[in-house]
Image (cartoon, rainbow, N blue to C red):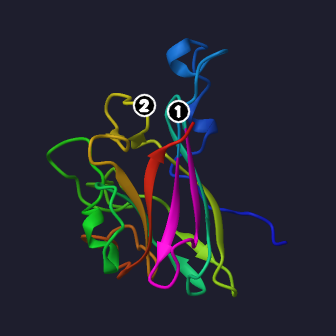
Amino acid sequence: MKPLLLVPLVASLAALGTPPAAADDHGAGAQIARAAGEFRTATSENAGTAELSEGPKGVVIRVSVDGLTPGWHGIHFHAVGDCSDEGFQKSGGHAHHESEKPLHGLLNPQGPDDGDLPNIHADDNGQARAELYSPFVTLSGAEGRAMLLDGDGAAIVIHEGPDDHVSQPIGGAGARVACAVIRKAD
């Protein structure tokens, strides 16, 4: 078994500091919000999984997906929890918490938008295993972040190529090749 590839985080966990131990900050005895999804591709209904856990300042995302082309792939949160169509267009654009959408890209001085995530890497067998972090989204409704478990849900979409984190509208990442609807987990 190959080791888990850790993708650089949007913001290092250490830089976020240690939150006070309060119930709404997931202190002792607090319930941590969790969600999950199953990836599908054009050729597989069960290509892998995504597990999400909310912390006090963002969401940790664990991705395990097979059937990708080897190399780097853009991955984003999309605004609608629908992966039912060919090409996954029903998942809409990137998730946002405001009506005004900032420009795309983790490296864009006018961005990033709330759906942005670091790229993931698929090995020579087309397998990607990664842990990512986003301070831009929420599962539990934290103020100032895009809500993933809202009325129309959200999806995690993987693209055919890497995201350059600057180009508009999706960093030149190309077609959508995998999609997972995010659902609340027990």
Residue positioned 26% across, 54% down in the render: 110
Q: Residue furthest right?
A: 1
Quadrant where the image shows the N terminus: bottom right
Give coordinates of residue 105: x percent, y percent. Answer: 35, 62
Label 1, residues with CA under 10 Å away: few <14, some 14-19, many ≥20: some
Check whether the beta carbons of the residues at disc 2 and disc 1 lie within 8 A of each other.
yes
Give coordinates of residue 97: x percent, y percent. Answer: 26, 41
Q: Which amino acid is tagged 1?
A: Ala
Q: Which amino acid is tagged 2?
A: Ser
In the depicted structure, whether residue 155 falls above or below residue 1? above
Lower sequence index among marks 2 and 1? 1
Q: Tell me if 110 is positioned left or right of 163 in this view.
A: left
Residue positioned 64% across, 37% down in the render: 14
* Residue 29: quadrant of the picture: top right
Mark 2, residue position:
140
Which segment is the magenta one? 36-53
Q: Tell me if 96 is positioned left or right of 64 in this view.
A: left
